[in-house]
């Protein structure tokens, strides 16, 4: 009962939400983007949103960092235009963050790079709507666009963020958590500023006006039966006009196992293997999980490994599979798959639960 509805049934809900702000029967010019740095999974989710909107007949412009082309390839959806913007690369951001620079300061530098380039690209172009990563509405506010926000992370503080930014709360919400969030946000703003600040901003719209008068709705990944954070369920139920569930944005109900899976399944059926396990730790660099792979081998499971650092490891390849395809959503539909070992990101969890595969979490950072 906890399975998510297939994405094919839910992605049109994003398009329906967009149509709700348009005259009957008309298409919209829509701007779509995600957080630009250290957010590959967010960028994938928002690309799926952009594709769904374009397939619904809208004219969609998707903003992505230059590096997204190598990671995600080029979309092939009619009506979808992609603009690549040059901002700080993920490796530089990660190195500086690990050296002690704050998330807020680094984000402000990215904003200073993003806003002038984005303004130059949109000059003379009219957009009816922005559909954006809820963590990063800075450009939508800069352009004073009516906005749909999309949840791309599962941080428990998101519930307090709903209260702080949108003025929305659920029944029996712990007021202490809200006050703690507000205090931390204000202290951060006083000392280093917000991750939405920028010296390059020329916005005339205050953040208060933007959230109150320009944000039409927040779209939450999950269903009334299953969502992260779990506290989102009663909040969405309490505000049906401002919040809505949209299922999984990255799971694809029409996905089929990669071509490699057929030979792999046949090989497993003719061996003593107890089945298959998928091992995938998201899009950020992570070390090869040798201890986990050894444990899977000991219990008779052959791992399909989507961790880049394991490539070329002969010891790993002796017992497990290092496939060519990196399509996690497709591999999750492989016959004989008994377990998904993932980092606990929002999208990996929804994809695994959506196909009914048991999950083991190995969290690495952040909201995992």
Image (spheres, rainbow, N blue to C red):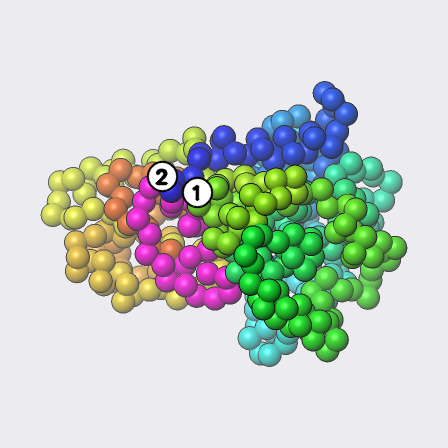
Residue 75, compared with residue 92, is above or below; it is above
**Res 258 quadrant in image:** top left
Residues at marks 2 and 1 touching, judged by CB atoms closer than 8 Å: yes
Q: Which mark is residue 225?
A: 1
Image side of residue 362 versus residue 20, left or right: left
Q: Between residues 10 and 296, which one lies in front from this camera angle?
A: 10
- Part of the protein shown in magenta: 343-368
Residue positioned 67% across, 68% down in the render:
182
The one nearer the camera, 262 or 168, is: 168
Residue at the spot of label 2: 1
Residue 352 shown in magenta: yes
Question: Can the viewer see residue 62?
Answer: no
Mark closer to the chain start, 2 or 1:
2
Q: Would residue 172 appear left or right of 295 to someone viewing this image?
A: right
- Seen at 81% across and 52% down, the residue is 209
- Is residue 315 in the magenta section? no
Label 2 to label 1: alpha-carbon separation: 8 Å
**Image spot of residue 100 (x, y percent):** 60, 79
Q: Specify whether residue 56 is in view.
A: yes
Q: How many circles with numbers are drawn on the protein?
A: 2
């Amino acid at each position: 009962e906890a399975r998510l509805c297939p994405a094919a049934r839910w992605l049109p809900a994003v398009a329906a939400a967009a149509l709700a702000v348009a005259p009957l029967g008309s298409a919209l010019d829509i701007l779509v983007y995600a957080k630009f740095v250290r957010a590959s999974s967010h960028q994938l989710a928002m690309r799926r949103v952009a594709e769904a909107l374009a397939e619904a007949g809208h004219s969609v412009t998707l903003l992505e960092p230059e590096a997204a082309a190598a990671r995600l390839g080029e979309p092939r959806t009619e009506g979808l235009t992609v603009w690549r913007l040059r901002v700080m690369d993920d490796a530089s951001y990660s190195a500086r963050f690990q050296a002690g620079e704050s998330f807020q300061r680094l984000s402000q530098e990215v904003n200073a790079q993003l806003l002038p380039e984005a303004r130059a690209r949109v000059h003379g172009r009219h957009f009816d709507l922005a559909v954006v990563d809820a963590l990063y509405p800075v450009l939508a506010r800069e352009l004073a666009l009516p906005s749909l926000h999309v949840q791309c992370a599962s941080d428990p503080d998101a519930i307090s963020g709903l209260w702080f930014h949108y003025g929305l709360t659920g029944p029996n919400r712990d007021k202490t958590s809200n006050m703690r969030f507000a205090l931390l946000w204000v202290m951060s703003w006083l000392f280093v500023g917000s991750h939405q600040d920028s010296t390059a901003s020329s916005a005339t719209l205050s953040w208060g006006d933007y959230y109150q008068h320009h944000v039409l709705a927040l779209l939450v990944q999950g269903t009334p039966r299953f969502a992260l954070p779990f506290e989102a369920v009663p909040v969405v139920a309490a505000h049906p006009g401002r919040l809505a569930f949209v299922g999984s944005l990255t799971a694809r109900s029409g996905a089929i196992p990669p071509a490699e899976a057929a030979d792999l399944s046949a090989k497993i059926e003719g061996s003593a293997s107890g089945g298959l396990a998928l091992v995938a730790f998201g899009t950020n660099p992570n070390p090869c999980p040798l201890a986990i792979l050894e444990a899977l081998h000991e219990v008779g499971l052959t791992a399909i490994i989507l961790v880049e650092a394991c490539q070329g490891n002969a010891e790993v390849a002796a017992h497990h599979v290092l496939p060519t395809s990196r399509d996690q959503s497709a591999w999750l539909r492989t016959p004989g798959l008994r377990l998904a070992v993932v980092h606990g990101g929002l999208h990996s969890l929804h994809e695994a639960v959506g196909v009914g595969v048991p999950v083991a979490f190995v969290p690495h950072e952040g909201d995992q």
